[in-house]
Amino acid sequence: MEILGIVLMFVKAFAVGGLICAIAQLVINFTDLTAGKILVMFMLIGIALTALGLYQPLVDFAGAGATVPISGFGYLLANGAMRGAQEGLFEAVTGPLAAASAGVSAAVVFSFLMALIFKSHTKYN
C-alpha cells in the first residue's frame, strides 16, 4: 500500500471517529444526561444502525474510526448476534458474547496488570 493510501486511511478514521466523539461531546454539554446514559445511548445507536444495515458501510469506509468508539461496541454485539442467529436461537444469544470476548478479556487483563504496576488512589489524595 502506498503512503498516500495509508495517510488517507488515517484521515478517514480520524474524521469519522472525531465526528462521533464531537457528537458525544455536544450531548454532554447540552443535556443533563449522565455519562452512563450517554454510553448506553451510543451503544444502542450502534446496534440500531447495524440492524438497519447502515453501520457496516461506515466501518468499511472508516475502519477503526467507526469500530473504536462505543458505538462500534454496539456494532460488534449486533453483528455477533446476527451471525449467531443464522445458526439458531442459542447462538443468537451467545454470538455477541463470542464476538466481544477478545476485547473484554484484553481490557480485564490489562487493567489487572496496571493495577499491579501502579498504586491507585482517588483524585484528591
Image (spheres, rainbow, N blue to C red):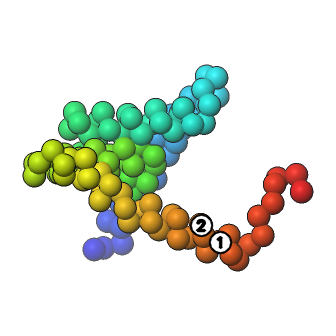
Amino acid on which disc 2 is placed: Ser
Residue beneath the point at 28% across and 44% down? 78
Residue identifier under label 2: 111
Q: Is 44 on the left or on the right of 51, as rendered?
A: right
- Quadrant the N terminus occupies: bottom left
Residue at 38% in and 48% down: 72
* Residue at the extreme top of the image, as rendered: 31
Image coordinates of residue 11 in percent, x first then y, are: 42, 55
Q: Residues within 10 Å of mark 2 (few under 14, many from 20)?
A: few
* Element under disc 1: helix
Question: Does residue 24 appear in the picture of this structure?
Answer: no
Q: CA distance from mark 1 to mark 2?
A: 5 Å
Q: Is residue 111 left or right of residue 64?
A: right
Q: Secondary structure at mark 2?
A: helix
Seen at 29% across and 51% down, the residue is 96
The residue wearing badge 1 is 114
Q: Is residue 19 above or below residue 67?
A: above
Q: Which mark is on residue 90? A: none
Q: Tell me which residue sits at (22%, 33%) in the image.
A: 52
Pinpoint residue 39: horizontal percent, then vertical percent.
Answer: 51, 39
Query: Where is 68 relative to 3, above or below?
Result: above
Disc 1 marks which amino acid? Answer: Met
